Amino acid sequence: MSALSESISRRLTLGQLKGRYGLTLVPDFAEPVTVTSLVDDLPSVRPGSLYVPADRQVDQGMIEEAELRGAYAALLPASARHEVGRARIPLLFGTMHAWQMGQLLANAAGDPSGALAVFALVGSQVQEQVDLLADFLHVLGNPVGILSAKGSYSLDRRLDLEYPLSMFDVQRSLSIALEDGAAAVVISVDEQTLARDALQAVDLDVVALGAQEGSTRDMRHVRLISRARRYGFNLGGHTIVAKRNEESDGLARQSLPADAQSDDLSLCIAMTMAAGVKRNNIRSALRVSREMS
């Protein structure tokens, strides 16, 4: 389901969309129409939806089906104006860049990532480490959500999602986690979990690259920049790029058996330290984890 519906928190009219993004509205007198959900696939359309087809190839049949399902309007590429005839619902036409669509979805949802501590692990083999970081944050006392193709959760509730996740799915999932009382969300940034541009307008607090993503500093930097461009997240501002260090390595080794691999735990420790968690709290959490294992 690719819909931002129950999570929409701000009144959104077609006139606002027209003015903010330079769109053409047909008919023009439909400016006061208010939409209550944003949807990018037909099965998710419900009464009140603004239908935004994920496929840029739009035909008359798609619009007619959206009408039958109760859509209040549709937002279509400018090129579709010649492909779609008369419709019984208002139509917005224009070119929305990925960053603009991400901004629209985040604003409509009330910017949930701004109210959460969002951790992102980047790499092709990080899903196990995502679970490890989520468990560690939980031991530290944080209600946690997870977005991962291995299994996405809002606290203990498994989310019924189809992968890879679109930016619609990500904003909706973050909103659900926030509403459920999560304080943090851990995201697996990989091709199985996320579609291109899925993290547009998502405010990431701490980002780290998986250990398998290159052996040299320059190679890892290039890989991280490449992933940021693919998925649409920003490495500037207050976002911190975390990596293992001597202190995190030492804390990890102290809490594990001598023959255990400590690199993954060390990176989790480094990420929580980057988020501002105090060292004494980290030591206490490691002690609790050791006692529970």
Image: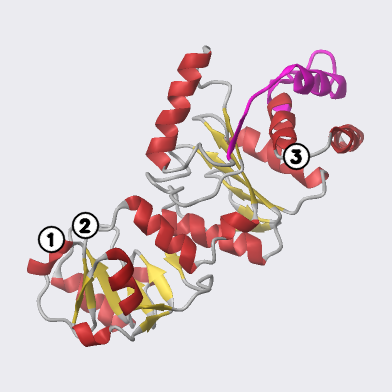
Would residue 73 be found to the left or right of residue 148 on screen?
A: left
Q: Residue at x 34, y 85 (%)?
A: 33
User: Do we see residue 1 in this rendering?
Assistant: no
Magenta range: 239-265
Q: Which residue type carries mark 2?
A: Arg
Q: Residues within 10 Å of mark 3 (few under 14, many from 20)?
A: few
Q: From the viewer's perspective, is the residue at label 3 or at label 2 nearer?
A: 3
Q: Estimate the spatial distance between the alpha carbons at disc 3 and disc 1, rounded to whole Å.
A: 48 Å
Tag 2 residue: 56
Going from N to C along the chain, the mark reached first, 3 or 2, is 2
Residue in the foreground of this view, choosing between 90 and 288: 90
Tag 3 residue: 276
Tag 1 residue: 79
Q: Residues within 10 Å of mark 2 (few under 14, many from 20)?
A: few
Q: Is residue 160 above or below residue 29?
A: above
Going from N to C along the chain, the mark reached first, 2 or 1, is 2
Q: Residue at x 43, y 66 (%)?
A: 3
Residue 168 location (% of width, % of height): 43, 59
Q: Which residue type carries mark 3?
A: Gly
